[in-house]
Amino acid sequence: MARIEVFKDMAVPVADVWEALADLGSHRAWMWDARSIRFVGAQTRGVGTRLEVETAVGPFHTRDVLEVTGWEEGRSITVTHRGLVRGKGVLTVLGRVTHVRVVWEEQ
């Protein structure tokens, strides 16, 4: 299985970064391939949250079902892809008070 990892370093307060990342419905604003994000059910954060994400890369479009399978408040969110795309992704916030590294790992 292929694995990718990307990261971004920022001089931003850790709490602000986590607040933005924990707002799963807003991820479309920075996920360049996401066309829409829709919650499946009433839950919008934490383990068990499910989202339907429509993505497009060039002429290829898919609806991917994501389930949050790990949630460490202030630190990481793990999602499992349960649609056509299969695998696991982990979004991790590392850093001190005002210097942050956000890491996205995908398998």
Image (cartoon, grey):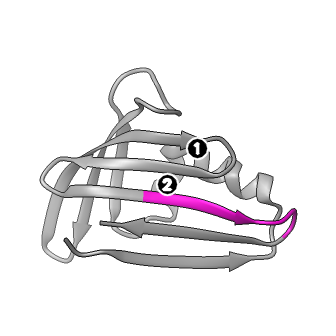
Query: Which residue in the structure is indicated by mark 2?
Result: 27
Residue 37's place in the image compared with 10, above or below, is: above
Residue 93 lies in the magenta-colored region: yes
Q: Residue at x 52, y 33 (%)?
A: 46
User: In the shown orientation, is residue 90 left or right of residue 96?
Assistant: left
Say whether marks 2 and 1 touch (CB < 8 Å): yes
Residue 4's place in the image compared with 39, above or below, is: below
Magenta stretch in the rendered image: 90-98
User: 99 or 62: nearer the eye?
Assistant: 99
User: 47 or 60: nearer the eye?
Assistant: 47
Q: Position of residue 63 (x, y in %)?
A: 19, 50
Residue 63 lies in the magenta-colored region: no
User: In the shown orientation, is residue 91 left or right of residue 96?
Assistant: left
Q: Residue at x 65, y 41 (%)?
A: 73
Query: Which residue in the structure is indicated by mark 1?
Result: 23
Secondary element type, mark 1: loop
Q: Main secondary structure of the magenta part?
A: strand
